[in-house]
Image (cartoon, grey):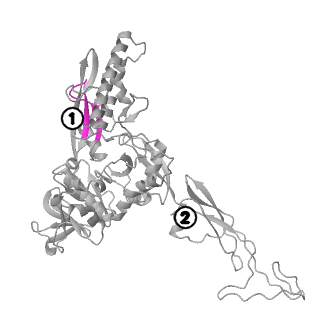
């Protein structure tokens, strides 16, 4: 930085640069200086600096005032260098003087860390991040690097294999802060989670009426239509109540107790279902804790059911003594407790996280087309029988068109069989292997593994995958989630006019391959309880 040196012009000496001259050739008197400001002359050249705030994107420029006192010995010069999309401050030593201590904000500007993220198939990627990078920022970076479809359902998972715990990070959480609370064996996973904000769309499915109530000081009940408003409003006092199995600290036994979750924490009743203050005992605080799903709870902790969850203090890394292990009776109850914990802890922050992708989509210019998930809303039934195509909006007409298309496929396949095919992939052979190129096909996985994948990626209506059947080597299985329950539908091959077709309704609706079958049930639910909406996917980093 250019510094201005203050000089005093003596009698008979030449006037300093920048001073005004009187007719007598003497320097004109300076104007009075403001209180608290040195009377040294200011340099006519204004130095310009650039800096990058840890809470902003890009460079911010500004003018600064030159020093008004004689300069101290030169400190090491600084320069800003772009590193991995952020800014790194590097120092070049030019003098033996010691650098002055800097603030925590200044250290944030220089902090760059390497974070290793794993995918479901075991592959990993090392990413260089800044100290102010959030979970949403890192997910978007990984989506870009992995060439995935950005449908705002990707999430970062904090995984503790030695404790059997995992949770999805909230979009606003800082990666560096979360990593500081993790042990050496813990890691981050990059995964889909369609149920992350599903409770904003269908709150009735997440909060059973018998589990939601007001706190005791307000007599009444919460209307279901105003349920989320009461959770988001910090002045209201909703609570979740019900029985849970609680693991006693330092013991292997579990005890069934009546619990209630409030903004102030999780309480258990020492006397039946009483919620009087003298009968309530605080088990866990929401402020300095996070809620995790319990993996293999029966094996690791002898849990009474598979619907376990845990409240883990942030200070705990590898110890299990301070973990509050809980277990619900069913999946809906566990989801209710865990969702209420997030809402009571973060409140409006969750709603803002949910709204950010929608606001960004609304701000896109009209000529830009947002990237959409193929499995969600980009498939429509079309009629190309006329000169121009039209969208078929009538479901009955769409089903009829799909059946006609299936018959057309059958005729084309029969004609090619008669004429013979010179291609190394015979049409009938192609129809039995082409589905293996699709993301929704997961090959030879077990029934239990398909359950695990569905649960990990969110128990929302329409989430599905296809896999090979274990009981019938020629058949396939459609695994589908509906009302937080996982159901299986067997897809059997059937022969008609010498051709192989696939059907899951005993041959009433036939398809030449599994791709055609999936596309049909994405448009029509048919014999299924709901349409196919989201497919489970695994991405290699």
Where does label 1 land, which residue? Answer: 527
Furthest residue toward front: 387
Query: Is the residue 404 above or below the residue 368 in the image?
Result: above
Q: Is residue 254 left or right of residue 291?
A: left
State the residue at coordinates (33%, 58%): 317
Query: Is the residue 200 above or below the residue 406 in the image?
Result: below
Q: Is residue 120 visible to the viewer in this orientation of the structure?
A: yes
Q: Is residue 291 left or right of residue 8?
A: left
Q: Is 470 included in the stretch rendered in magenta?
A: yes
Query: Is the residue 44 above or below the residue 391 in the image?
Result: below
What numbered label is drawn on residue 275?
none
The answer for how far apart the CA atoms under marks 1 and 2 are is 57 Å
Q: Quadrant of the N terminus?
A: bottom right
- Mark 2: give few (<14), some (14-19) or many (20+) Cα within 10 Å: some
Residue 411, position as x, y percentages in the image: 33, 18
Residue 430, position as x, y percentages in the image: 37, 21
Where does label 2 land, which residue? Answer: 53
Give the residues in magenta.
463-480
Q: Quadrant of residue 172?
A: bottom left
């Amino acid at each position: 930085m250019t510094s201005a040196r203050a000089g005093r012009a003596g009698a008979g000496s030449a006037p300093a640069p920048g001073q005004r001259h009187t007719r007598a050739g003497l320097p004109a008197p300076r104007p009075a200086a403001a209180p608290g400001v040195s009377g040294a002359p200011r340099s006519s050249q204004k130095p310009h600096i650039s800096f990058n705030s840890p809470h902003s994107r890009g460079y911010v420029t500004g003018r600064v005032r030159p020093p008004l006192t004689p300069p101290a010995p030169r400190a090491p010069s600084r320069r800003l260098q772009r590193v991995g999309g952020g800014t790194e401050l590097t120092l070049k030593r030019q003098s033996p003087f010691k650098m002055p201590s800097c603030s925590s904000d200044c250290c944030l500007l220089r902090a760059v860390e390497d974070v290793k993220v794993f995918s479901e198939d075991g592959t990993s990627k090392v990413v260089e991040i800044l100290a102010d990078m959030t979970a949403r920022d890192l997910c978007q970076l990984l989506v870009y690097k992995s060439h995935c479809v950005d449908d705002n359902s990707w999430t970062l998972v904090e995984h503790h294999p030695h404790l059997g715990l995992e949770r999805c990070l909230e979009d606003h959480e800082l990666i560096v802060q979360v990593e500081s609370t993790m042990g050496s064996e813990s890691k981050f996973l990059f995964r889909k989670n369609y149920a992350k904000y599903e409770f904003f769309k269908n709150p009735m499915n997440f909060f059973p009426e018998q589990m939601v109530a007001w706190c005791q000081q307000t007599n009444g009940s919460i209307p279901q239509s105003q349920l989320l408003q009461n959770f988001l409003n910090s002045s209201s006092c909703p609570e979740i109540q019900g029985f849970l199995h609680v693991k006693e600290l330092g013991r292997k036994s579990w005890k069934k107790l009546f619990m209630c979750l409030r903004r102030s924490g999780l309480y258990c009743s020492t006397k039946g279902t009483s919620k009087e203050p003298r009968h309530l005992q605080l088990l866990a605080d929401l402020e300095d804790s996070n809620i995790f799903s319990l993996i293999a709870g029966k094996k690791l902790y002898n849990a009474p059911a598979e619907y376990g969850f845990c409240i883990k203090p942030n200070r705990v890394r590898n110890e299990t003594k301070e973990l509050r292990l809980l277990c619900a009776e069913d999946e809906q109850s566990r989801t209710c407790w865990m969702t209420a914990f997030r809402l009571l802890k973060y409140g409006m922050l969750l709603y803002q996280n949910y709204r950010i992708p929608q606001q960004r989509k609304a701000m896109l210019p009209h000529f830009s087309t947002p990237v959409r998930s193929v499995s969600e809303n980009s498939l429509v039934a079309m009629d190309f029988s006329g000169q121009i195509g039209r969208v078929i909006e009538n479901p009955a007409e769409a089903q009829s068109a799909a059946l006609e298309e299936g018959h057309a496929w059958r005729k084309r396949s029969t004609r090619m069989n008669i004429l013979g095919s010179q291609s190394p992939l015979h049409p009938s052979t192609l129809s039995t292997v082409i589905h293996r190129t699709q993301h929704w096909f997961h090959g030879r996985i077990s029934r239990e593994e398909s359950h695990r994948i569905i649960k990990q990626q969110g128990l929302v209506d329409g989430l599905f995958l296809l896999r090979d059947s274990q009981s019938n080597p020629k058949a396939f299985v459609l695994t589908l989630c509906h009302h937080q329950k996982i159901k299986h539908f067997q897809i059997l091959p059937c022969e008609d006019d010498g051709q192989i077709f696939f059907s899951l309704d005993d041959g009433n609706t036939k398809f030449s391959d599994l791709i055609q079958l999936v596309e049909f049930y994405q448009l029509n639910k048919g014999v299924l309880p709901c349409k196919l909406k989201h497919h489970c996917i695994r991405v290699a980093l």
